[in-house]
Amino acid sequence: MNFLAHIYLSGDPGPLMIGNFIGDYVKGNQLERFSPEIQKGIRLHRMIDDFTDHHAIVKKSTARFKPCYQRYASVVIDVVYDHYLAKNWEHYSSVPLSTFVNQVHAYFIRHYFTFPNRVKGFLPFLVKSRRLENYKHIWGVETSLSIMSNHTSLPAKSACATKIMLEQYEALNAEFAAFFEEVQQMVKDHL
């Protein structure tokens, strides 16, 4: 799961959401630098990632992107699944996506100095670009993957990802929906 899903699964804006958002940027005992509620969010992030990485449906979705991305296909599916969450947002929330994103941005900006330096570096761009909201568009997925390929070892093959999404759109949507019901229940049971 990528940014939007982790944020959504945290519930209302708060320290738990910050922790769930920054989970990938906090390694090992760096966890102890944060408040107990943020630590809880970081642990939740790790639990969600572990659940996702080992789930049969996610593996099936990931396999669709292996021809283009090989071992990086799981990174791509995280972004693709955020697309389906954004696209089907009204199924998961009574709050419009744009309103939810505004609330999250406002909370994150108020707590900017809580974030690790790496997150502080990209947070203004994430807010300005409205990336969380733009996941609902195919071009938003392409843009996100392009940004990631410029700053990580992810191959620059966003056009290939788009082609696969368009060819297998409904199958991926169904896989996401089935998986997301399960991950929501896992988080609910945990919290």
Image: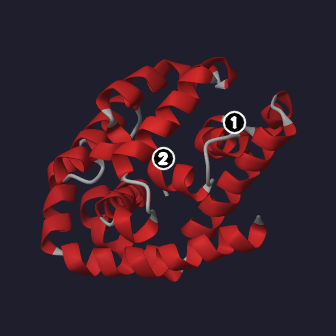
State the separation of the CA atoms marked 2 and 1: 15 Å
In the figure, residue 69 lies in which quadrant?
A: bottom left
Q: Is residue 89 visible?
A: yes
- Element at badge 2? helix
- Residue shown at the point (63%, 76%) measured from the top left: 185
| Amino acid identity at mark 2 | Phe
Q: 95 or 27, which lies in front? A: 95
Residue to which mark 1 is pinned: 26
Mark 2 or mark 1: whose residue is earlier in sequence: 2
Q: CB of mark 2 within 8 Å of CB of mark 1?
A: no
Horizontal and vertical percent position of residue 1: 49, 58
Mark 1 neighbour class, 10 Å CA radius: few under 14, some 14 to 19, many 20 or more: some
Horizontal and vertical percent position of residue 48: 63, 62
- Element at badge 1? loop
Q: 75 or 94, which lies in front? A: 94
Residue to which mark 2 is pinned: 3
Tell me if 84 is positioned left or right of 20 in this view. Answer: left
Is residue 56 depicted above or below 53 in this figure? below
**Residue 64: which numbered mark, if any?**
none
